[in-house]
Amino acid sequence: MHEAIGEPLHLNPWAAVGIVVVCILLSAFFAGSETALTAASRARMYALENGGDRRAATVNRLLQSRDRLIGAMLLGNTLVNIGSSAVATSLLVAMAGERGAVYATLLMTALLLIFAEVMPKTVAITAPDRMSLAVARAVSFFVAVFSPALVAVEAIVRLFLKPFGLDARGAHPLLAGREELKSTVALLHREGGVERADRDMFGGLLDLNELTVADVMVHRTKMAAISGDLPPRDLVREVLASPYTRLPVWRGEPENIVGVLHAKDLLRALDSAGDPDRVSIEDIVFDAWFVPETTSLRDQLQAFRKRKTHFALVVDEYGVVLGLVTLEDILEEIVGEISDEHDVAQQGVRPAADGSVVVDGGTPIRDLNRIMDWRLPDEEATTLAGLVIHEAQTIPEAGQTFVFHGFRFEVLRKTRNRITSLRVTPLPRER
């Protein structure tokens, strides 16, 4: 019986061993190449291609058809693994009889696992970019050779998936490019490769198109403005006492903004007139620029650059002034707080010794997250007080406590219908 089983083998034993070795090497090549190419940095390859590296151009071309690339590597790997196993089985059956099939299974499992899977993939993942460049041309050759077979395989796969309502061609990434970039930077920060300030700056830059001017504006309740009805001398005194160089001017009532006064224009007029009482405010106030509250920060930044100004008033759909936005407000979303010698220090966030933080109700959630490295949601509310009101579905009283989003919120002070101060305590995370 042994002779009957071993009769089909016509290869010299050493030739059979050589075929097995070559198949294992090819299997290692396919497995390592797949790991290296899928783990390669697209940004680094793009930079190398721009620098004239043809191998990087080949890598980028392969990655543009990632499904075809992976399919070719799997097909090649399957072919050589089956071939090596078949040859090894025939050889060992001829040498040891029926037990040779068991020996071949154990031997090939160990050889393929160690030398064709674990070892090449470990080498590839330690230096994916360098290995991708080294194997790019060879992989491109195999992809071209296997393409006809892969087209047939893809057609068969789509045919079997169609009854289940699945379309392999309609696959889309779960994360948009912007979210994927943010997640990558957040992961690098957690692993220690990116500083917190750099992470926040990068995230702020990516968020410019998602945020609107209403998210960063100075609300009208905190907006510094002056009355145009004041006598010139009093108006000059008000402007000099203000830390701001541009001030909205109103007449009759604070909501009736008639223009914007620049302190430098006032000083020029004062120098020319020589007497504050002779200064005509109407001659130096320039027209206010009104922008809708739904304008994205990216569009507003471009508008500031185009108009060569950096001050605008924000209005709602009814034309009611909601607040003001400046170029500095937008830049602070990217680089963080910008202060100069004339800014008024705001103590809106005061950490306590017990781990809690006393926060002014009007503090923007994004600023609080940036300062404390928290992750409070800011989709439904702009300020911390607004978040508490939204979650509580009522205007709470002083002394009330709420727990949500992993924090305890205690209302410390309330003025009329406004929450002016809260104590926020992070809760221990459940394991």
Image (cartoon, grey):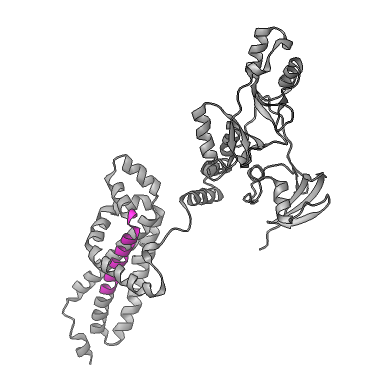
Quadrant containing the N terminus is bottom left
The picture places residue 169, in percent across and down from the top left corner, at: 36, 63
Q: Nearer the viewer, residue 26 or 259?
A: 259
181 relative to 170, above or below? above
Residue for point 69% across, 45% down = 383
Relative to 63, 301 lies left or right: right
The picture places residue 397, in percent across and down from the top left corner, at: 82, 51
The picture places residue 33, in percent across and down from the top left corner, at: 33, 58
Relative to 322, 92 lies left or right: left
The picture places residue 308, in percent across and down from the top left corner, at: 52, 26
Q: Quadrant of residue 114?
A: bottom left
Extreme bottom residue here? 1
Quadrant containing the C terminus is bottom right
143 relative to 133, above or below? below
Residue for point 68% across, 11% down = 270
402 relative to 216, above or below? below
Q: Residue 4 in magenta?
A: no
415 relative to 126, above or below? above
Extent of the magenta region: 63-84
Q: Can residue 87 be seen in this snapshot?
A: yes
Q: Can residue 427 be seen in this snapshot?
A: no
Q: Main secondary structure of the magenta part?
A: helix
